[in-house]
Amino acid sequence: MADFLSNYSIQKWLESCPQGYLEDTVYGHGADEREPEELLKNEQFREAQIRTTVQLIAGERCALAASSGLINAAPDAASKTFLATQTLDEGRHVEIFTQRLFDLGIAQDDLESTIKTYINPNLGKFAEVLLEKVDKKDFVAGVVGQNIVLEGMAFSVFEMLHATSSDMNPKFAHTLAGTIADERRHVGFGENRIGELIRRYPEKKPEIERMQRDMTKHMLATFHDSFAASPLAAASPSVAPGARKSAGTYQGLNLAEASNEEMEGALSSVVLNEFKTRLGRIGLEYQSPV
Amino acid sequence: MSNQSNPHELGDADFHSTVHSFEFWFEAVEGYLHGRPYGVSPSTKDVELDERQREGLITTLCNYCVGETAALEASSGMIRFAPDRHAKIFLSTQVVDEGRHLEVLLHRMAQLGVAEPEAEIEKRANRSLLKFKDRLLDFVDARDWEASVLAQNVILECLEFTVFRHHSGTADPVTADMLRGIVSDERRHMGFGENDLGRRLLMAPHTHDRLHKIKRELDTLVLDTFEETLGELGVDRAERPDLAGDYLAAVARLGFRS
C-alpha cells in the first residue's frame, strides 16, 4: 500500500499538476483565450452555457466539501495528504468554473442568485446523499461516493463537454482538459485505496451499494432535466449556432445531427458502464436504480 | 500562470478574489518550491548527527507532525462552514500547504531511519500539544468560525512560525532548508487570520471578549508545549530561547495582546 500511495504524494502532485499541465494557464486556459463572440451575442446560447456551468460549479462545490470533509476521517497520513491535493484540485475547479460564469457576463454580486436560479434540484439531492456519509466520517462510503461515483460522473461529463467544445470553444476545452486530468487521478486513488478497505470491511458493502444506487438515480434525473432544459444547446453545449455543423463526434454520434435524447442516452450509457467497471474493480456490484 | 500585480493596491473585493485564489497561491509557492523535492534544495548536503542529536530531532519532528496534522484536519474541516467562496478557496490552498508540511516532515523522519512514524509520533507526542489539537478540533466540530480562525490561523500558526523560525537557525542544513519553506507558508496563513478576524472585530467588537477568553486558555497550552518540548530535548534552562516571549509578540502583532 505504501508504494501505491507514494504515487499520490503532494510532491508528485506539485510536479505533475501546478508545475506540469497547469503551467502557463490562467483559470485553467491560455491567457489569450476567450469565449467565442457568437456565443456571447446569442442570448439563448449564452443562457444554456450559464445553466451548464452552474451544474459544474454545484458538482465541484460538493466535491470540495466531500474531499475536505474526508481528511479528518482518513485512516493514515498518506491518504490525508492525497485528499489534501484533491481538496485544492476541487477548490481550483470551483474557482475556474465560477470565473467562467463571470466570463459569460454574470456580475460578481449575482453569482449566488444565478446558481440558485439554474441549479438542478436533482443534483442537490445527489450531493446530499454523499455529504451525509461525509458528515458521519464514513471514510469507505465517502471515498466510493466521492472518488468513484461523483468523480466517475464528472469525468464522463467533462469528456463529453470537451468533445463538443474542442473545435469551437478552445478556451472552455482547455479548461476542461485540466479538470479531466485531475479527475483521472482522483478516480485512480479511489479504486486503488478503497479496494483494499472493502476487502477488510465486507460488512459495509450493502450500505455503500445503497448509496451508489441513490446517487445514480439522482444523477440520471439530472441528465434528463439538463438535456430537456437546454434544447438548443444540450447536444452541442459549447458552441454557437452557426458552428454546430462542424462540431465533432461523441460516442459515435455526429454532434451536428444528434438529438437531445440520443445525447442523453449516450452520456448515461458511458457513465453507467464506467460505474460497473470501476465498482467491479473494488469488489462492489453496480446497483441499478430502476 | 498569470503575473499578479501588487494586491495591496486593489480594492477590498478585488483584494480578496486575488489573494484567496489558486493562482495567487501557486505564484507564492512556486518561487520556493520549484526544483526542491520535499522542500529541500538538491544542493543542500546532509550531515551526520550523533545519536543524541538524532533522537532529539526525531522527537521534535514527531511533535511538528502533531501540529501539522492538527492544522490539516482543522483547515480542511473549516471549508464546509467558511463564510464565503474566497475563504473556501483560501482554505483549500492552506489544506494542501499543511498536507505538504506533514509529508516533508515524515520524509525527513524516514531519512533519519524512522520506520514506523505513526507509532513513533504516538510515543513521543507532547501532551499539551495533543490537548491543543483536541480543543482546536472541538471549535471546528462546533462550526465556530471565529474561534476556529483564532485557534488555527492565529495561535497555532504563530506557535509554528515561532518554533520553526528559531529551529531553522540552529538545525542541520537539510532540516533548516525544509523549515524555511514551511515558515513562508505560515506567513500567508497568519495573514489570512489577521485579515479575517481583524475585519470581524471591527464589525462586532463584542466578540473581542469571547476570543480573548479562548486565547488565554490556549496560550497556557502553547506555553506548556514550549516548556515540555525544550525539557524533553534536554535544553538547559539558561540556554533556552525565549519562545514564549516571541510567540506572545507574534500574536500581539496580529492584534491579540495578552
Image (cartoon, coloured by chain):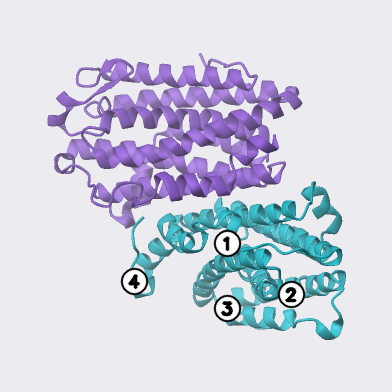
Chain colours: A purple, B cyan
Q: Secondary structure at mark 4?
A: loop
User: Which mark is first along the chain, 2 or 4?
Assistant: 4
Q: CA distance from mark 4 to mark 1?
A: 39 Å
Q: Position of residue B199 (x, y in %)?
A: 49, 73
Subunit ID for the residue under disc 2: B
Query: Where the N terminus of chain B falls, by quadrant?
Result: bottom left
Residue linked to disc 3: B254
Q: How many marks?
A: 4
Subunit ID for the residue under disc 4: B
> Between residues A86 and B89, which one lies in front from this camera angle?
A86
Q: CA distance from mark 1 to mark 3?
A: 36 Å
Residue linked to disc 1: B43
Q: CA distance from mark 2 to mark 1?
A: 39 Å
Q: CA distance from mark 4 to mark 2?
A: 35 Å
What type is the residue that disc 3 sits on?
Answer: Leu
Query: At 66% across and 26% down in the image, what residue appears?
Result: A195
Subunit ID for the residue under disc 3: B
Residue linked to disc 2: B219
Query: At 30% across and 24% down in the image, what residue appears?
Result: A228
